[in-house]
Amino acid sequence: MDLKSFLFAPAGRAAQYAFVILRLVIAGFWLNSCIPRWTRLILGHPQANGLVRGLFGSGMVVPLTYFFTLLETLSAIALILGFLTRLASVWGTIEFAITGTVGLTMGIGALTKDYGLMAGAIVLLLNGSPLLSIDGFLAESKAK
């Protein structure tokens, strides 16, 4: 096996299913954190994220919280559908790097899981996930 085939060979069938599972796991974590914020907004009690307050100040904390929540929700839906997987993974890599580092420096143990999610987002960014996805369907239709 030469270096070129090692670095650039397409993933096998089992690995393709692993990418699908990885997409769904990351989307599940995102939705798990987004749903309570959307619920509070619908009930008339918008939630201000403490992490957003710490990074950007208190002036725009609620609008920025919901802007980032919107990006997380859209990225989670994109990962579930397998649509623009690599673009959603860029957002995941950036967000999970920031939240994981802040969690580590502030001693918030619950946020350190974000390093694992960041690693998963990097894997999806590098490999994509064409199996069982809209991206794969569009690639096949263009090839015909």
Image: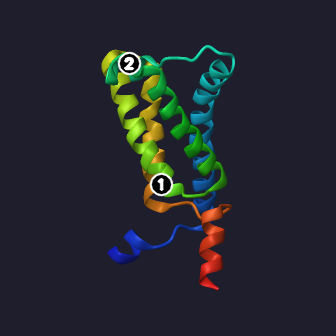
- Is the C terminus in the top left, top right, bottom left or bottom right quadrant? bottom right
Q: Residue furthest left?
A: 105
Q: Quick one: 36 or 22, which is closer to the camera?
A: 36
Q: Please tell me whether mark 1 sits on a helix, a strand or a loop.
A: helix
Taking the image as shown, residue 122 lies to the left or right of residue 80, namely left
For the residue marked with disc 2, what is the amino acid?
Answer: Arg
Instruction: Give coordinates of residue 134: x percent, y percent.
Output: 65, 63
Taking the image as shown, residue 132 lies to the left or right of residue 58, namely right
Instruction: Give coordinates of residue 32: x percent, y percent.
Output: 62, 29
Q: Quick one: 89 or 37, which is closer to the camera?
A: 37
Gap in Å between the C-alphas at discs 1 and 2? 26 Å
For the residue marked with disc 1, what is the amino acid?
Answer: Leu
Q: Quick one: 55 or 43, which is closer to the camera?
A: 43
Q: Residue at position x 66%, y 54% from top? A: 81
Q: Residue at position x 33%, y 29% from top? A: 101
Instruction: Give coordinates of residue 132: x percent, y percent.
Output: 68, 61
Q: Residue at position x 55%, y 45% from top? A: 75
Q: Which residue is mark 1?
A: 87
Picture disc at residue 53: 2
